[in-house]
Image (cartoon, helix red, strand yellow):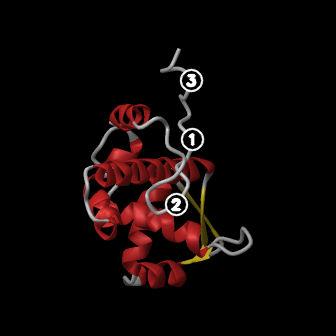
Amino acid sequence: MELLERLTRRQVDTLRALKDGEEARAGVRLGRVAEILAISAPSALAHLTALESLGLVDRYRGRSRLTPKGQSCLLEYERHHRIVERMFDRMGLPRERLCEAAREVDLSIGHATIERLCVADGHPGTCPHGEPIPRCPHRGKEES
């Protein structure tokens, strides 16, 4: 099972909160993570602790930041989410529902399936909302 498939929705949201809340590479304080997620500090700490045990988060002096592995995992999540949004868009789902619908399934679709969807869609550069789709690390290998 891929690392991304083992994460909960809240853990992915915690990774995103670290990315969005970080200021000048100084990390994010626990209270700020809790505020972004709209949860209690103890709940935020539980998510951070689980992510730290997976090597996705580094905590130092009261601040948390994504490790390189955490950054890669979040990039992979963004890729999954945006490719699924494109699939739902092509199916005719209303644009205002795309993100919500993608969140229902983006963590449960494996990497190989996402890559097949990406290939079938001609390696799109952006999602329907104009956000960039991270480049496939295997692009070119499946086209040989």
Please tell me which residue is depicted at 56% across the width and 54% down the height of the picture.
132
Tag on residue 135?
1
Q: Residues within 10 Å of mark 3 (few under 14, many from 20)?
A: few
Q: Choose the circle earlier in sequence order: 2 or 3.
A: 2
Please tell me which residue is depicted at 44% across the width and 73% down the height of the picture.
45
Tag on residue 77?
none
Question: Is label 3 in contact with label 1 (beta carbons under 8 Å)?
Answer: no
Image coordinates of residue 127 in percent, x first then y, are 46, 55
Question: How far is disc 2 from disc 3 in space, using C-alphas?
Answer: 24 Å
Q: Who is closer to the viewer here, 4 or 49? A: 4
The residue indicated by pointer 3 is 140
From the image, state whether disc 2 or disc 3 is nearer to you.
Answer: 2
* Kind of residue sitting beneath label 2: Gly
Image coordinates of residue 8 in percent, x first then y, are 32, 58
Q: Is disc 3 placed on a helix, strand or loop?
A: loop
Image coordinates of residue 135 in percent, x first then y, are 57, 41
**Left or right: 140 in relation to 3:** right
From the image, state whether disc 2 or disc 1 is nearer to you.
Answer: 2
Q: Residues within 10 Å of mark 2 (few under 14, many from 20)?
A: few
Please tell me which residue is depicted at 50% across the width and 20% down the height of the picture.
143
Q: How many marks?
A: 3
Question: How far is disc 3 from disc 1 in space, using C-alphas?
Answer: 11 Å
* Kind of residue sitting beneath label 3: Gly
Please tell me which residue is depicted at 31% across the width and 57% down the height of the picture.
102
* Kind of residue sitting beneath label 1: Arg
Q: Residues within 10 Å of mark 1 (few under 14, many from 20)?
A: some
Q: Choose the circle earlier in sequence order: 2 or 1.
A: 2
Image: 80 above or below 19: above
The residue indicated by pointer 2 is 130
Image coordinates of residue 140 in percent, x first then y, are 56, 23
